Image (cartoon, helix red, strand yellow):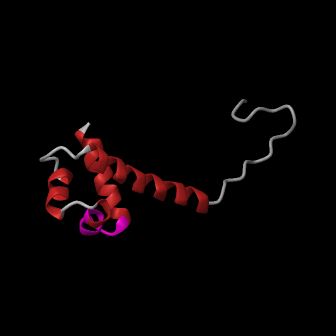
Amino acid sequence: MVDVYIRTLARAAEIVGGAQALAFKLKVTPSHLSLWMAGLEPCPGPVFLMAVDLVLEREIDLQKTQPVPKLEAQPAGESPGVN
């Protein structure tokens, strides 16, 4: 479970431009953030949820900007992947 916290904080830091920027965004001290990112102390739930929000917002924005892949037309009566 700790790994999920660490990976989420690392991804959030990546998104905002580094650990220092993430600490500012989360309104925590950089020293506390570094302890949480290293897995040395548990990250408080509310702080973790703010980091999750940052990651989800970024993923949603990426989904909006990526083109939707077009499906190839199948001849009538055929199912895709069936021989």
- Image check: 44 left or right of 54? left
Number of residue marks = 0
Between 29 and 81, which is closer to the camera in this rendering?
A: 29
Q: What residue lies at 25% left-to-right and 42% top-to-bottom?
A: 3
Extreme-right residue of the structure: 76
Q: What residue lies at 59% left-to-right and 63% top-to-bottom?
A: 65
Identify whether 45 is placed above or below 59.
Answer: above
Q: x%, y% of residue 28?
A: 22, 60
Identify whether 5 is placed above or below 65.
Answer: above
Identify whether 55 is placed above or below 25.
Answer: above
Residue 13 lies in quadrant: bottom left
Q: x%, y% of residue 19?
A: 25, 64
State the quadrant of the C terminus: top right
Q: Which residues are magenta?
A: 16-23
Q: What residue lies at 20% left-to-right and 57% top-to-bottom?
A: 33
- Verify whether residue 38 appears in magenta: no
Q: What residue lies at 29% left-to-right and 50% top-to-bottom?
A: 47
Please tell me whether the stretch drawn in magenta is mainly helix, strand or loop: helix
Q: x%, y% of residue 30?
A: 18, 63
Between 48 and 73, which is closer to the camera in this rendering?
A: 48
Q: x%, y% of residue 75?
A: 85, 40
State the quadrant of the N terminus: top left
Residue 16 lies in quadrant: bottom left
- Verify whether residue 18 appears in magenta: yes
